[in-house]
Image (cartoon, rainbow, N blue to C red):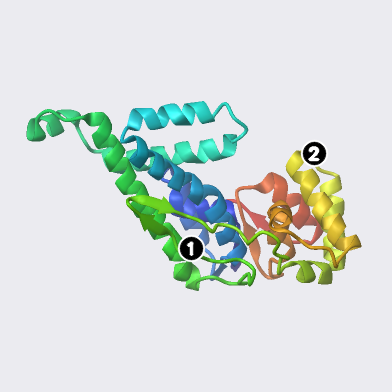
Amino acid sequence: MKAFVETTVLTDLLLKLDGSEIRAKSLLEKYNFVTVPHFAWKEFKRGPLIAFIWAHNKLLETKSYDITLQRLQGMSRTPKRYFTSTAIQAIQTAFSASFSELKVADVAARYGEVDFDHMMADACRFELRRVISKSWTSRFRLFDGITDVLSCYPDAELIYDDGMIIYKPYDCPKGTDCCLKNKVFAKSEDVRKIRLSLSRLSDKNEIIKRREVIKRIEKHPTSIMSPSDCRSFGDAYFVLFCPKDHDIVTTNLSDIKPMADELNIAVVRP
């Protein structure tokens, strides 16, 4: 049995502490061979990892657990709902790891008067820094490291500057022609099947953009596939480039399974 790991499961495995990490690990342990493509790491950094870094940096900036939560509450009223949800997950993960066995009375008895808001901010930030650093460096060793390297993507390390975590670059440079474009065009029949499966799905903005990118590659293979196009292509990558003897392991069944069914690729959820 072989697994092709999609970004949502990579995120569960490395960043979460709500039981989903246990389910992901348990499922992947059943496979004889596990592949994590470079594309998954790219999506991981520019999506969930940045949300965790935002939480870390905001805790450092405000030096307050309470104010950071207020900033998150304010952001929840913006279109960044998925980012906000992941940032809340980051705070919850760090809080659980830092304070699950801590009793406020014990701290007060040992240290006297304590600014608990500041203390909680620092403790969560230190835990987030540990999780962020460990998860990003694991791309070189987790399941034997990165596969299917993207030549157009600058896989940069995180930078630590006066406590802040700098995550740029997190995407391909502007004006870059995606290294996947010719490979996508070469799989014309599979691409056609995926496009047809997308036409039967709901008209979510994400699906519409994916369909448009695929259609443009089919009709105009010499046109540039920009970093924005690559992001819209998104979930289609895991279907189009999944080795035929692998299962796609994902929690995003609603978007990936209809495409995978067209190519007779198994999809498994932890």
Q: Quadrant of residue 3?
A: bottom right
Residue nearest the viewer, comparing 87 with 225 = 225
Q: Which quadrant is home to the N terminus?
A: bottom right
Residue 181 position, x and y percent, is 77, 67
Residue nearest the viewer, comparing 175 with 185 = 175
Residue 80 position, x and y percent, is 59, 36
CA gap, disc 2 and disc 1: 34 Å
Mark nearer the viewer, 2 or 1? 2
Q: Which mark is residue 221?
A: none
In terms of secondary structure, where does tag 1 sit? loop
* Residue visible at 63% across and 61% down in the picture: 173
* Residue visible at 55% across and 40% down in the picture: 83
* Residue visible at 70% across and 44% down in the picture: 254
Query: Which amino acid lies under the numbered mark 2 shown in the image of this protein?
Result: Ser
Check the image and report above or below for 223 versus 208: below
Residue 42 position, x and y percent, is 58, 59
Q: Mark 2 or mark 1: which comes first in sequence?
A: 1
* Residue visible at 38% across and 53% down in the picture: 131
Residue 164 horizontal side relative to residue 267, left or right: left
Q: Residues within 10 Å of mark 1 (few under 14, many from 20)?
A: few
The total of numbered circles placed on residues is 2
Query: Which amino acid lies under the numbered mark 1 shown in the image of this protein?
Result: Glu
Q: In the rendered image, which residue does mark 2 sit on?
A: 202
Check the image and report above or below for 144 versus 134: below
Q: In the rendered image, which residue does mark 1 sit on?
A: 29
Residue nearest the viewer, comparing 143 with 3 = 143
In terms of secondary structure, where does tag 2 sit? loop
Q: Residue furthest right?
A: 219
For residue 80, say whether it is visible: yes
